Image: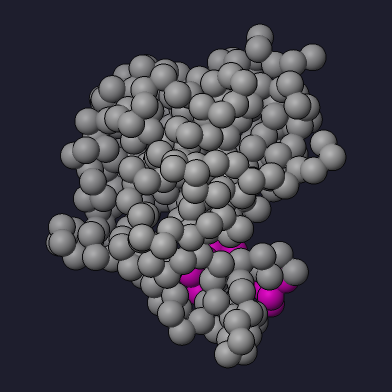
Amino acid sequence: MSNPHVTLSGHSGHAIAALTEGPEQGFPVLLAHGGGQTKRAWKQVTAMLARHGFRAIALDLRGHGDSAWADDGAYDIVDFAGDLVAIAGSLDRKPALIGASLGGLAGIMAEGEVAPGSFASLTLVDITPQMEAGGVTRVVGFMAAHAREGFASPDEAARVISEYLPHRPSRKASSGLAHYLRLKPDGRYYWHWDPAFIDGIMRRNAERGDGSDYGRGELGEAAARLALPVHLIRGGSSDLVSPEAVAHFRALVPHAAYSDIADATHMVVGDQNDAFGDAILDFLMRTHGTEIAA
């Protein structure tokens, strides 16, 4: 493709940056990352999908990466869901949606509540309506810790990431980390996402008194209405989605396929990219294989 970097229109025209890969007429697959990530989280996945004839469209969710920030602080799940619905509706056919964490929550709400029938299938990456409070607290705590004050250097940011992901080899700042940081006039480096996003999550969690209940009732109701093909992928060592949460989800969505990725935490894609790729490709080929452009 001549220009893989595009800007798409989310809800009410909100500017959403995206990276596309694969044949123009290939079956479209939208990829929505987790909170605090960007479209780069799917780099190896989009290449794999493209090789198999899919048209991969990796998004920067609102307030993240190169997408526009919400001046009105509109970072509720329904806002992210509205963007996904708008983008899906702009394509020439219904896309498959793969959503990790925040992207998956938005997918559940989009298909189960906002606009049923928007997607051809839904893959949820280590996310269910029921979440472990400790896992939610750890994720939110990491994002909030340096949201306002930033870092003195990329190496400091790399150290903080290593402490958050102790199971991965420690390393100094790489060129890839530069895509997640912004150097501001004060000489400090800040995450690429809008601090108002995490402020909103912390405020809502405080109001509920339990970080595990991220709209669980509403999300559970939306999940129970999912009629399209669904695939739940769990990190085998996830501290956010427990086996009990999986059982709860499978009771809500009994037709859902299920994959458990061994030796992967909540950060499934980064921990076990090859195994994750095999799992999503198997589901997509079984579900949409006959629709892939030659």
Q: Residue at x 72, y 47 (%)?
A: 5
Position of residue 228 relative to residue 279, above or below, is: above
Position of residue 225 relative to residue 4, above or below, is: above
Which of the 4 image quadrants contains residue 229?
top left
Q: Is residue 69 left or right of residue 277?
A: left
| x then y, percent, for residue 88 | 52, 29
| x then y, percent, for residue 12 | 44, 43
Position of residue 94 relative to residue 233, above or below, is: above
What colour-coding does the image apply?
A: one colour
Which of the image's four quarters has the N terminus?
top right
Q: Residue at x 41, y 62 (%)?
A: 71
Residue 23 showing in the rendered view: yes
Q: Residue at x 24, y 34 (%)?
A: 220
Which of the 4 image quadrants contains residue 110?
top left
Name the foreground residue: 183 vs 105. Answer: 183
Residue 270 showing in the rendered view: no
Main SS category, magenta section: loop
Name the residue furthest front: 12
Magenta span has 49? no
Name the foreground residue: 223 vs 197. Answer: 197
Q: Is residue 136 left or right of residue 182?
A: left
Q: Is residue 132 left or right of residue 159?
A: left
Name the foreground residue: 283 vs 168. Answer: 283
Which of the image's four quarters has the C terminus?
top right
| x then y, percent, for residue 56 | 67, 34
The residues colored magenta run 163-174
